[in-house]
Amino acid sequence: MTWLPKLKKSEAWLHRFRAKARALEPPEPSTELLERILASRAAGARVVLETDDHPRNRSRSVRRLAAAATVVLVVGASAVLRWHQGPGNAARQAPPLDDLTRLMFPWPSMALAQQPDAPPSRPRYGSVPDLDGARLHAGEWRYQVRVKTDGILTSERGRRAYALAEATFGGHPVWRITTSWHPQGFVDSILVDRATLRPLRRVFQPARVRFIQEHSTDSLREWLVRRAAPQDTVRSAVALPNAPLIDWLTTKVALQALPLAPSWRGSLYVVSTAARGLAPLNLRVVGRETITVPAGTFDCWKIKADGPDYVENDLIWVSRHEHWVIKTRSRPAYDTEFEELLVSHTSQGPR
Amino acid sequence: MSPDPAWRSKPVRRRTASLPLAHLVAAARSGSADALGALYERYGAGLYRLAYRLLGNREDAEDVVHDLFVGLPEALRRYEERGALESWLKRVTARVALMRLRAGGRRREVHLAVARELVGGDSSAAPPDSRLLQAAVDRLPEHLRSVLVLKEIEGYSHAEVSELLGISQGASRIRLMRAVRRLRKSLEDAR
């Protein structure tokens, strides 16, 4: 019975721990929390709460569905590729455009895919009333992209850059934002209103197709042109609300125009092709950190972003003075982290 | 964004707060901001403490309580009033908090928060051993910490913990044992 004293000692320790831990007073919630809750309700925000579902069963179901969807995607994609690359292909008819659009990560586009399934979900925080377009400054920002697996293995995944330049469109001053991926060689170019950053026209040209989007005040029209068969051009359109919105690719630029401050939070609607419609992007300043990246050391706001399905607890470090994105970190899978680190820039900073 | 001005009316809320709980729940279900405010005043602080203990930082705990009360009127329509409302609210809060934990990206913040507090942050008024204890709890891995917080601090049974976390009761017991072992070692090392 040598274990008995040990057990008694352990129980006594646990008893003491319990008493001390229960006596620990966590901080009180901030005084304006109730105000924020009621403001969110009044603004129409709603949250669906898990009440009775067994969380593990639910996550298992989600995992099973995700696994099934992945299998279908992989099998479908390989079938299309085999069909497209197989012998005697020249004699065959070209694959339908729908198949090509499915292979265009991170597209298919919103209108080409189909109309949005449902109205956009409610933003978590108050909508950002005005983006301060005057804060923006021309320049180019280059990022190193890397993927970390299991917190240990790091692999480089090329470079990404975006450039912001003044331009005109239909006689009006606009910003041209060009995003490029290396070594893939994709270039995506978008024109946005100089003051509001609302998208006006976007052109994306991967290897075999040309994809164009044009926005008006209430709709988005799209063209997908297959270079080998321009006669197969697909046109489509989708209605958009006349509300402040930005394109997903403009997010890094939009951060330059936000009034960031300690505890600042706000939501923006983004035209999200992956979400097939508008989705709120919820942003919250969670702290301040000094970080070092290849481009140097920066005093940053640390921002947490979530909203569209594919943005969940992403972290963005934005320099406090210029509001440049210095680093981003997202977790597309449980054991995988995706990071972008600023390598260089040509901007002179805010005017 | 202008909030519904009704909630600013403190005398009205005071009257609402004195209503029997069943009436409050019924009013909150129908979307009354006053009733929601009264429920927050009754239970908000306790639910925030639970969320804070599970998540380890204020911002996330506030977000959990925010989401809970924003979704509460609709969720109350599924509340069957068979048990105490507070227990039901705690279970829902724990689920929301645990879902956030599973979403990842929490632990580093916890560590930073703890580090800040240890170097003289806003909980410096707490006695040193309390701060050490809090830091040691915060350093536990999430799967152990959740069991420890729910079982030993919040007072749930192993059956309830296993239901909340979706694990077996045996796993709950083992995790608690491991959590206690690590906690003791951590505290002994700190001495």
Image (tube, coloured by chain):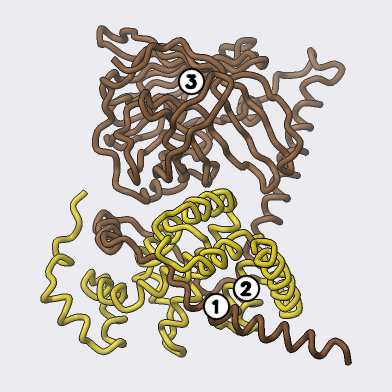
Chain colours: A brown, B yellow
Q: Chain of mark 3?
A: A
**Percent of width and height locating residue A190:** 43, 18
Q: Is residue B189 left or right of residue A133?
A: right
Query: Is A12 in front, or is A272?
Result: A12
Mark 3 and mark 2 residues within 8 Å of each other at the beta carbon: no
Please tell me whether mark 3 sits on a helix, a strand or a loop: strand
Label 2 vs 1, first from the N-terminus? 2
Q: Of the residues tagged 1 and 3, which is closer to the observer?
A: 1
Query: Is A130 in front, or is B121?
Result: B121
Task: Check disc 1 and report the residue beneath it.
Answer: B153
Residue occupying the point 46% across, 80% down = B88
Task: Check disc 2 and report the residue beneath it.
Answer: B148
**Percent of width and height locating residue A332:** 63, 42
Picture quadrant where residue A279 is located: top left
10 Å neighbourhood of mark 1: few (<14), some, or many (≥20)? Answer: some
Task: Check disc 3 and report the residue beneath it.
Answer: A223
Residue A204 visible in this rendered orientation of the protein: no
Q: Is residue B21 left or right of residue B18?
A: right
Please tell me whether mark 2 sits on a helix, a strand or a loop: helix
The amino acid type found where label 1 is placed reads Ile
The amino acid type found where label 3 is placed reads Trp
Q: Disc 1 versus disc 3: distance between alpha carbons? A: 59 Å
Residue A108 higher or lower than A224, as above or below: below
For the C terminus of chain B, the image quarter is bottom right
Residue occupying the point 64% across, 57% down = A62
Picture quadrant where residue A267 is located: top left
Q: Is residue B12 left or right of residue A183?
A: left
Residue occupying the point 65% across, 83% down = B159
Q: Disc 2 versus disc 1: distance between alpha carbons? A: 7 Å
Q: Chain of mark 1?
A: B
Mark 2 and mark 1 residues within 8 Å of each other at the beta carbon: yes
- Judged from this view, the residue extending furthest toward the front is B191
